[in-house]
Image (tube, rainbow, N blue to C red):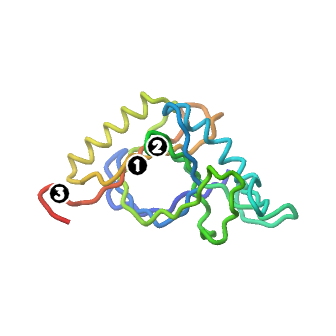
Amino acid sequence: MAIEEAPYKVAQENGIFEVRDYEPHILAETLVDGSLEDAGSKAFRRLFNYISGANHSRSSIEMTAPVSQEPKGEKITMTAPVSQQASAGKWAVSFMMPASYTLATLPVPDDSSITLRQVPARRMAAVRYSGTWSEKNYLENKERLENWIRENGFVIRGEPVWARYNPPFTLWFLRRNEILIPVDSLTKDQTL
């Protein structure tokens, strides 16, 4: 499957760790209660319905490229990853929207629990790993990334994001997962 991903430039690379500069992008996002492992499943159906045409213009967001037209509405290329982040006691689960759209041109969701928001350009530290979508794997890799960030002179500037790039039927050992944490290069002795 051809899936558009959030564009970024690698600023630093060290094995499974990277520091990336991401361009601005738009997310379709929904908040859900539940455990780390359950939140993605709960939110996925809402977001999938939105990209399948549950929106004011009945536009459909395809899981494959390219962008095309058909009678039931405009097709929008599905992008990766599906992201999940803690937010006020809930989980914000999101799909990145294709770069060809703006907030003004994306279809309005029928479900009021789905919001569209612009994410500014930002620098993110990342660790890539394969395996199951478990809280244990998430926490182990988040800790590894936090340690790497501190050891390499970066400062954490936001909450971690759990990014999953593959559909649930992908074999666990072939799955691409990432933890992303906003950072900058300031040391604790420097002032902003």
User: Mark 1: few, some, or many residues within 10 Å (few <14, many ≥20)?
Assistant: many
Check disc 3 and give the amino acid type.
Answer: Thr
Question: What's the residue type where badge 2 is placed?
Answer: Trp
Callout 1: SS: strand
Give me the residue at 48% from left, 62% from top: 119
In the image: residue 55, left or right of residue 17: right
Residue 13's disc number = none
Q: Pointers 1 and 3 in contact (CB under 8 A)?
A: no
* Circle number at residue 162: 2
Displayed quadrant of residue 19: bottom left
Label 2 packing within 10 angstroms: few (<14), some (14-19), many (20+): many
Relative placement, left or right, of 112 versus 188 is: right
Q: Earlier in the sequence, mark 2 or mark 1?
A: 2
**Image x and y of residue 109, in percent:** 69, 57
Residue under label 3, please give it: 187
Q: In percent of the image, x 45 and y 45: which residue is there? A: 87
Residue 130: percent from left, percent from top: 48, 36
Left or right: 28 in relation to 73: left
Q: Of callouts 2 and 3, which one flags the residue occurring earlier in the amino acid sequence?
A: 2
Badge 3: residue crowd in 10 Å (few <14, some 14–19, many ≥20): few
What type is the residue that disc 1 sits on? Leu
Q: Are marks 2 and 1 in contact (CB under 8 Å)?
A: no
Judged from this view, the residue extending furthest toward the left is 189
Q: Quote the CA–CA distance across marks 2 and 3.
A: 25 Å
The residue that disc 1 covers is 180
- Report how many numbered discs are placed on residues in the image: 3
Where residue 182 appears, as percent x and y from the top left, is: 35, 54
